[in-house]
Image (cartoon, rainbow, N blue to C red):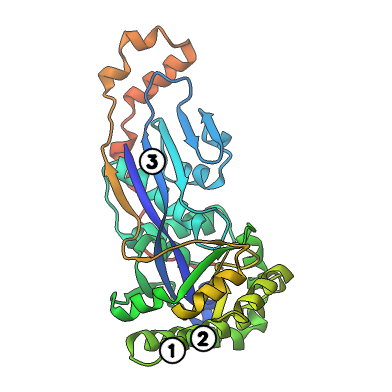
């Protein structure tokens, strides 16, 4: 049994510059942090005496024998990509709702890839995890996604992520200091109650990239300015005012980024002590983040009492194996006759095939060490 824990992330500045339609020409950068809420993936080999070879439990329970029958797109793509042949059982539990702007989809992809590797006895690097997750989401699933979420959830921590036009990237970690802890104390996270399709909104943004060069260049420059604030000893409230500025720019990237409902939340917050804020992720709903001085936060909480407050703190670990107890079924145990009499001929053939299979020991993941170029 393998348990991986992959953190969700909050992105502050630079979102949008991590789409290939932008960074392959101009480069990009993002400032983000992971938080102490996680995507948890429990994975084990499936015992041979069950009727189905695979069981996947997420918001649904899928008992299947063929990958093509898997309903969950990411699970189906990962199982095929990693050429899984032995029976597996997976259970997913997310600490926060999916499709809400905290990179839950990428955390799931990173976490499941990590779990399959670990179950096969292979520990992979953060870099490999990020690149493989990008490959699955963008090349196999054809999602309209950037690359910051996969990198952030794989690496963990408070980072400046720089994406180069040649499709390489660098992760520069900001050391946890009193200044970073002070920032954490100034942030409040709320759930709007609205889930949305990030891929659809991101597609709208990507279509408009050519017409939004001024906004995107400014959003990229704000990453370095924000790092300067966190590394300096000036007024930390400048960070909050920059959040307001980047939200105003983000709203210009596509009409679907905000709604009347979100604008009303934002206006109430700004009238009640917030210095800035933004919808997280692609936009359209999900979680909204506000920056407010600690002494002003009670007034802000009262103004947004109709929303759910999510306490959080920054964390420094990326996707990691929290439990490593791999279970093994030997060739002898798979062939035992007391299993055989419980099976019909078709299932017994599956057992024999599984018993003779050495695919997991022979398996080597394709080395994905660079973000693929999109033509």
Residues 356 and 92: in front is 92
Residue annotated with mark 2: 242
**C-alpha span from label 3 to label 2:** 39 Å
Task: Find out whether the residues at labels 3 and 2 contact each other: C-beta distance under 8 Å.
Answer: no
Q: Where does residue 100 sit, x and y in percent of width and height?
A: 57, 59
Q: Where does residue 121 sit, x and y in percent of width and height?
A: 26, 43
Judged left or right of residue 204, residue 111 is left
Q: Is residue 15 visible?
A: no
How many labels, in total? 3
Helix, strand or loop status at disc 1? helix
Task: Find out whether the residues at labels 2 and 1 contact each other: C-beta distance under 8 Å.
Answer: yes
Q: Residue at x 47, y 31 (%)?
A: 55
Q: Within 10 Å of the Cα at label 2, are there few (<14), some (14-19), or many (20+) other Cα atoms?
A: many
**C-alpha span from label 2 to label 1:** 9 Å
Image quarter in which the C terminus is found: bottom right
Mark 3 or mark 2, whichever is nearer to me: 2
Q: Where does residue 358 sit, x and y in percent of width and height?
A: 31, 32
Q: Where does residue 29 sit, x and y in percent of width and height?
A: 45, 78
Q: Residue at x 27, y 29 (%)?
A: 328
69 above or below 267? above
Image quarter in which the N terminus is found: top left
Residue annotated with mark 1: 225
């Amino acid at each position: 049994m393998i348990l991986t824990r992959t953190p969700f992330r909050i992105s502050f500045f630079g979102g949008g510059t991590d789409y290939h339609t932008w960074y392959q020409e101009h480069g990009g950068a993002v400032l983000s942090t992971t938080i102490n809420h996680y995507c948890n993936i429990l994975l084990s080999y499936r015992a041979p005496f069950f009727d189905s070879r695979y069981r996947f439990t997420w918001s649904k329970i899928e008992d299947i024998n063929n990958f093509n029958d898997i309903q969950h797109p990411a699970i189906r793509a990962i199982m095929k990509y990693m050429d899984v042949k032995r029976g597996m059982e997976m259970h997913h539990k997310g600490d926060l709702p999916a499709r809400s702007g905290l990179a839950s989809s990428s955390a799931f992809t990173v976490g499941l890839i990590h779990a399959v590797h670990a179950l096969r006895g292979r520990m992979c690097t953060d870099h490999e995890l990020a690149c493989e997750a990008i490959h699955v989401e963008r090349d196999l699933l054809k999602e309209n996604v950037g690359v910051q979420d996969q990198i952030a959830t794989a690496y963990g921590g408070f980072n400046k992520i720089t994406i180069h036009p040649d499709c390489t990237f660098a992760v520069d970690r900001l050391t946890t200091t009193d200044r970073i802890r002070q920032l954490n104390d100034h942030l409040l996270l709320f759930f709007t109650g609205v889930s949305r399709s990030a891929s659809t909104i991101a597609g709208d943004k990507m279509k408009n990239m050519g017409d939004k060069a001024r906004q995107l260049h400014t959003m990229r420059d704000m990453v370095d300015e924000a790092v300067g604030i966190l590394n300096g000893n000036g007024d930390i409230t400048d960070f909050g005012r920059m959040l307001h500025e980047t939200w105003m720019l983000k709203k210009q990237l596509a009409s679907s980024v905000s709604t009347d409902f979100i604008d009303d939340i934002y206006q109430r917050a700004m009238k009640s002590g917030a210095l800035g804020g933004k919808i997280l992720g692609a936009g359209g709903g999900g979680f909204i983040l506000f920056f407010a001085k600690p002494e002003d936060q009670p007034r802000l909480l009262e103004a947004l009492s109709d929303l759910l407050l999510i306490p959080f703190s920054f964390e420094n670990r990326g996707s990691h194996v929290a439990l490593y107890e791999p279970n093994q079924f030997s060739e002898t145990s798979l062939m035992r006759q007391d299993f055989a009499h419980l099976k019909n001929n078709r299932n017994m053939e599956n057992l024999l095939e599984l018993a003779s299979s050495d695919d997991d020991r022979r398996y080597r993941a394709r080395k994905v060490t660079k973000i693929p170029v999109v033509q």
